[in-house]
Amino acid sequence: MSSQFSITDAAKACKQASLRIAQLTNAEKNSVLEDIAKAIIAHSDAILDENQKDIDAGKVKGLSNAMLDRLLLTPERIADISDAIIDITRLDDPTGSISNLALRPNGIQVGKMRIPLGVIAMIYEARPNVTAEAAALCLKSGNGVVLRGGSEAIHSNKAIARCIGLALKQHSINQEAVLIVPDTSRAVINELLTLRQSIDLVIPRGGEGLINFVTDNSAIPVIQHFKGVCHLFVDKFANLDKALNLLINGKTQKPSACNAIETLIVHQDIAEQFLPIVAASFAEKGVKVHACDKSLPFFQGAELATDQDYDAEYLDDEIAIKVVNSYESAIDHINQFSSDHTEVIVTQDTSRAQQFVRRINSSVVMVNASSRFSDGGQLGLGAEIGISTSRLHAYGPMGLEALTTEKFVVFGDGHTR
Amino acid sequence: MSSQFSITDAAKACKQASLRIAQLTNAEKNSVLEDIAKAIIAHSDAILDENQKDIDAGKVKGLSNAMLDRLLLTPERIADISDAIIDITRLDDPTGSISNLALRPNGIQVGKMRIPLGVIAMIYEARPNVTAEAAALCLKSGNGVVLRGGSEAIHSNKAIARCIGLALKQHSINQEAVLIVPDTSRAVINELLTLRQSIDLVIPRGGEGLINFVTDNSAIPVIQHFKGVCHLFVDKFANLDKALNLLINGKTQKPSACNAIETLIVHQDIAEQFLPIVAASFAEKGVKVHACDKSLPFFQGAELATDQDYDAEYLDDEIAIKVVNSYESAIDHINQFSSDHTEVIVTQDTSRAQQFVRRINSSVVMVNASSRFSDGGQLGLGAEIGISTSRLHAYGPMGLEALTTEKFVVFGDGHTR
């Protein structure tokens, strides 16, 4: 390929190829995915060699150890990637069935059929496993896919792309159905975001800067995942044993996850009972506390919480605490600082539980359950292509169905209006 | 109001007010709508006076008679607007119910609850009835609404807004929940399109220029309705009586509608039988024909069709005709020229009908039924806020449900991960 790469031409070819993908049966799509999984194992050595180039370049660039670890592939990790693709073959095909076929008073039968979106573009950073998984999820849901990974993983991504291309070729499917963008410049993103004739959806995965940039500059619909400032509200009617378990699980099981608890809200009527237990547990686990004036005395060495703290996604052993004087104040605090990710109430009172579920409109609202369940796999979606914290099209963890839409189907027998 | 209007501040206030709207029960929302309907009747005279100002200004501006007619209100038309609001009270509330509450292997119960989107902005042209109907549909689905109508109807829109404001006040609801933008400059649209913290969805209704402008410049999700280039494919296994009825109904019942037929595709095996009948009927009805080389000899005075014709939304007694040599060619032609609105096959063959429904992914796909049924009311949506020809969030005619989304709800009993 000596000629200049054009994202406009490549995306057009991907759109054309996606028409074929949309017509494959579930068995055909699974067969393609199985062959991709096999090709990745068969070419492990080549993938590892290319990954080494990325790792070497990353060291020269001075990437952090955490970044290098995310970039690194090993034989085990390659096997995991291959297994994840096989897992996707076991999911139900979301497309093709017709629902709610109803006879209308005008005599026609009207139903809806679920269909692929068309072409989905993913813009993401240095995780080569995303390349394979996103391709598999998009193919399984009948879509073409444009994958624009970061420069850090470009050799690994291209090596995985070659495996995908081989499998597509085996099935006589145009390889452009899975387009790995070889150009890692910012300019290619700018151009990509104008291509609304060829690309139906953009999913950026990365920091807030990337997501804001894509949102502000895209003529194509964007699914956003800004951040997770998840709240745990311990109501005055809470069972405090359950509350402590949910707090410790939510905050400390995996603090780096977007579904970790970042703010604890405590009803003042149980604050004196509950906060000392929390303080002992946080001291033991080494959780740093930013406390409101009412809770500050309970936590040795804590700092006074500011609005910045209530807005913060710590992603670490660190938490903001707020004592509220009423149920209403808890709702108000959450509505003010919500990131529309996940909020939890701990209460034994059914009315207050029911009200919480009705009044908090974050994408996942829980009663007496850990925020850590806010995940596609845990919620029953099978696999997750991302989480949406904006309300259009999909809201919350996104599975295969979020990569589809519904068209109307109408059956008549010569009916006219 | 002597102070400067700020769309940023007004939209923020609308967002705040929308939290209250989202919490109203169906009975409360219906009561508000009934009072809006009453207020519009009670203030008919004032609305007619203000409408006269718009009509006078329109005449000075030299608006076409068609435009002036769309702008004109009469006592009957005001009664229709009021009745349409009452009709909306009779629709089911799309929000609040929880569906598919399933017990997961991890012990938690997971379901989805339908909720309002938040704030919806409509940008539209000179039809004062849209002001009242859009406000009613958004309120009924629990949303706040920003209405930015054109300058031609500004006096009428403000008069209707005062009626809506009176009804909201009666129910102690902040009047900013229904925001009629008093500024009709293009600059206010530019600013509005950046307000993604306050506005969740933009629906432009108007010409292709407006829709392209909004799509290319909006940081907020946009629902697009570009155009309707609807195809009628008469297969070789068609019943020709039904085919003629569907063609005449689709093309001539209301040529100005977006669901009118713009292109007729005929299988060559029945072309010699069918086209003379079509030609006779079109001659009688005065339909102008742009025909392909194979069909041209059948139509006296017809012009040779170009790709521009196959791409045209005539919205008039005018049609493009194409004879195809196979079923495949018909599918290819539709996929190439589709506007993703509505396509119809006429056939008695079940396999070919089934394939058509599977392979054509326009928003409405029909078998042996008139394209004129492609309308929210006819398809059973109750009312229609618009039609989407893009696949994200909503596709095809949009009813109340398209103004909502779903959040996850999770119930546990202290479950942790």
Image (spheres, coloured by chain):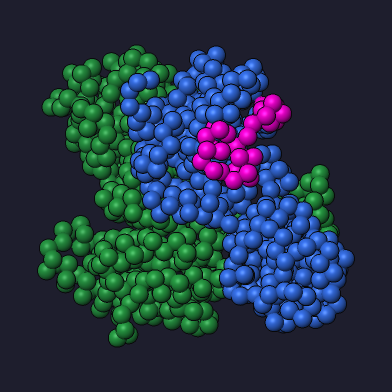
Chain colours: A blue, B green
Q: As rendered, which of B174 and A158 lies closer to the eye?
A: A158
Question: What secondary structure predominates along the stretch shown in magenta?
Answer: helix
Relative image position of residue A73 (x, y in whole percent):
64, 31
Q: Residue A56: say if magenta.
A: yes
**Compared with residue B178, is residue A124 higher up or lower down, i.e. above or below?**
above
Check the image and report above or below for A261 versus B380: below
Q: Which residue is the extreme one toward the right?
A: A241
Residue reaching furthest bottom? B2
Q: Which of A344 and A412 is in front in this view?
A: A344
Residues drawn in magenta: A54-82
Instruction: Say left or right for A45 vs B348.
Output: right
Q: In this orientation, which residue lies closer to the viewer: B56 or A18?
A: A18
For the point 58% across and 29% down, which residue is it? A51
Q: Residue at 40%, 48% (x, y): give it.
A: A218
Q: Is residue A94 left or right of residue A293?
A: left
Residue B283 location, quadrant: top left
Residue A285 can be seen, yes or no: yes
Q: Which of B93 and A176 is in front in this view?
A: A176
Residue A53 lies, in percent from the top left, at 54, 29
> Looking at the picture, does residue B329 appear above or below residue B389?
above
Q: Is residue B75 magenta?
A: no
Quarter of the image with the C terminus of chain A is top left
Which of the image's four quarters has the N terminus of chain A?
top left
